[in-house]
Structure formats: structure tokens, C-alpha cells
Amino acid sequence: MDGGKAPVAAAPPAAAGATASSSSSYATAPTNGNGATAAGSDSKAGRRGLPLLLRSGADGFRRCLGVIDFLLRVAAFGATLAGAISTGTADERLSVFTQFFQFHARFDDFPAFTFFLVANAVAAGYLVLSLPLSAACVLRPKKGGARLLLLLCDTVVMALLAAAGAAAAAVVYVAHSGNLRASWTPICMQFHGFCQRTSGAVVAAFLAVLVFIVLILMAACAIRR
């Protein structure tokens, strides 16, 4: 009888141990919950620290690129429009001795400047037409078709504007420096206003070309991502 009662008396400590282990597990559970809550709050705080356009991951990145794309197009439109106006108004007359003996310098006397004017006008018109597509890329960043179309058109217009700018830059260089081997004398000492307008137009055109290069790289990056 006594030998049989000893195991029965030893049972309560085991139950107490089980109770202790279960209580310890219950005690550690809130700690894990607090850790998860702290991690979640830290992640939320990190997201709040980001700009609004970048909080939604890849879509936010594309939307941010779309906003920059829109602003750059507005800037490039201003540059190309200024280049076209400056070239189209490049007209100067130089009177020698009397008013009946004059030298005349006008942009359409040079085919390169005519091509340059047309290229700037085409680029400015294209940039205005591309603004709705750029805005659509901001509102709907997942639309890859609009970005691809802008990428192709930007490449064509950039090539056209770069070719026209290079041709006009060559004429401006000869007007400023001349060419001794060809016996071409510089004319900018006499036609200062004409050279100043055409030189400013060339600088504006190459700034627009630089903006187009940035736009092409941004579009390729957005499509890739």
C-alpha cells in the first residue's frame, strides 16, 4: 500500500511544473507581440519618412519619374521656343557710307539656319503634344505603352534637333572666327546683333538636346523597372 501511494503523491509537482511552463509560455507571448508591434511601427515610421511619391514601391518610383519627365518637357519647350524665336528674328542691316549702300544679314540667307528654325519649331510643337502623355504616365504609372511611345518619339526629335544644332553651330563658328584657308572673313564684328541671336539660339537648342537625353534615359529606366 505505501509503495503504491508514493507515485500518487509525486504527481502534483509534475502538474505544478506543467503549470509553470505554461505560465512562462504565456508570459513570453506578450513580449513577442510587443516586438512585432514595434517592428511594424518602425516600418511605418520608415515609410512615413519617404516622400509621398515613393511610398508605393515601383509604382511610386515610376510616378516620381513621370513628374520629373513632365517638368523637363516644359523646360525643353521653353528652350526650343526661345531658339526658334531668336533665329526667326535674326535680321540686321549694316549701312556703309550711305543708306543706299547696305549689307543685310538674315537667317534665311543661310540654309542651315532655316533648317535649324524648322527643327526648333517641330521640337517645340512635339513637346506640347507630348505633355498629355507625360501626365498620363504620372496618373497611371503602370502604362508602359505611353512610355515606349514617348521614348521612340523623343529619340527621333532629339536626333533631328541635334543635327540642326550642329549645322547651325558650324555656321555660327565661321561667322565668329572665319576661315583663313577659304578666305572667309568673320562677320560678327559688323553684325553683332545677328551673331548674338543665332549664338543664343544654338546654346538653347543644345540645352534642349541635353534635356531630351535625360528624358530618354529616364523613360528607359522606368520601362526597365
Image (spheres, rainbow, N blue to C red):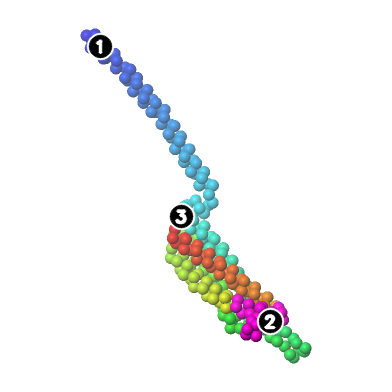
Label at residue 5: 1
Q: In the rendered structure, does residue 178 fall within the stretch colored magenta?
A: yes
Position of residue 39 relative to residue 185, above or below, is above
Q: Position of residue 54 (x, y in %)?
A: 50, 53
Spot the residue most to the top: 2
Question: Between marks 1 and 2, how big is the CA–CA gap?
Answer: 124 Å
Residue 140: x and y in percent read: 47, 60
Magenta residues, start to end: 169-192
- Secondary structure of residue under mark 1: helix
Query: How far is mark 2 from mark 3, CA to CA?
Result: 55 Å
Observer-nearest of 140 and 17: 17
Within-10-Å neighbours for mark 3: few <14, some 14–19, many 20+: some
Check the image and name the residue furthest to the left. Answer: 1
Q: Assess whether residue 118 is covered by the magenta stretch.
A: no
Q: In the image, what residue occupies the spot 54% across and 73% down? A: 162
Q: How far apart are marks 1 and 3 (CA)?
A: 72 Å
In the rendering, which numbered label is found on residue 187? Answer: 2
**C-beta proximity under 8 Å, tags 1 and 2:** no
